[in-house]
Amino acid sequence: MRYAALTDTGKVRENNEDAYYADGRLFIVADGMGGHQSGEVASALAVQEFLRYERDNRHRDPLRRLEEAVQAANRVLVTRAAGDSALKGMGTTFTVLLVENGAYLGHVGDSRAYLLREGTLNPLTRDHSLVERMVREGRITRGEARSHPRRNVILQALGLAVELDVDLARVDVRPGDRVLLCTDGLTARLEDAELESILGEESELWECARRLVEEANARGGEDNVTVIVIDLDNADVPFSSADEVGGERARRWLSRIRRRGDRGG
């Protein structure tokens, strides 16, 4: 398997609230939300807790493991926010692909996963957003959704409530498939047809990831953008690895949270 991961703050925002993880088996994108850098903490903390739970429960069925790990991350975010006024209102989207004797997908929010097969791009996730629900109900068109004034309203995200519905699926993958995981900093700027074109044209993974990010920035770069591009082939050794979990500021906040936890409050 070969893969490339890239994140960028964009041209407008000062902080990058996205987090990602990629190690050749697990691939995660998370888009944090909340003021005063709490979005950065939410996405980083969610990835951290997911990885802890998943690694401690490798004996479980893959889909059950994904759901339980996402739920564990959600509980940690809810608890942290309740105990720290600076983190109140924090949340994050979360999309994870597990490749382990098959491919398994977990999804909450409006980050996305796509599958490119023989030049055709198909979505693997459905946004948990107000405009997506309005499209499904026939109240607005897909084109109208892209510019709708409430397009940023998320109906499901980690950290917002104790009760959380996680979309889970086993994904039919074949050698030669290409998978894209991304935050909405990419999909808010590029149409699916444009994603399909770039993913199909660029054989070099890092060039593909770079071009996707640069195109999003060229369209305004109003949001952070994170992409992971994965080629499913017969390679035994990953092409690259990335285990970045949030930015430096997020790591400082996480360190502070841990110290508070060690003191019992």
Image (cartoon, grey):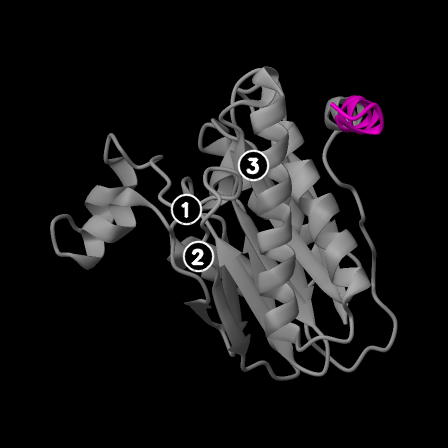
Specify the amino acid type for callout 3: Val
Residue 194 among those drawn in magenta: no
The first of marks 1 and 2 along the sequence is 1
Residue range in magenta is: 254-265
Q: Which image quarter: residue 65?
A: bottom right
83 over 26 or under it: above or below: above
Residue nearer the viewer, 3 or 25: 25
Magenta segment, principal secondary structure? helix
Q: Name the residue under label 1.
A: 156
Residue 99 screen position, x and y as percent? 70, 73
Specify the amino acid type for callout 2: Asp
Mark 3 → mark 1, Cα distance in angstroms: 13 Å
Quadrant location of the N terminus?
bottom right
Specify the amino acid type for callout 1: Gln
Residue 93 screen position, x and y as percent? 52, 44
Mark 3 → mark 2, Cα distance in angstroms: 15 Å
Q: What element carries label 2?
A: loop
Using residue 167 as the reference point, say whether residue 227 is left or right of it.
right
What residue is drawn where x is 28% and y is 43%?
130
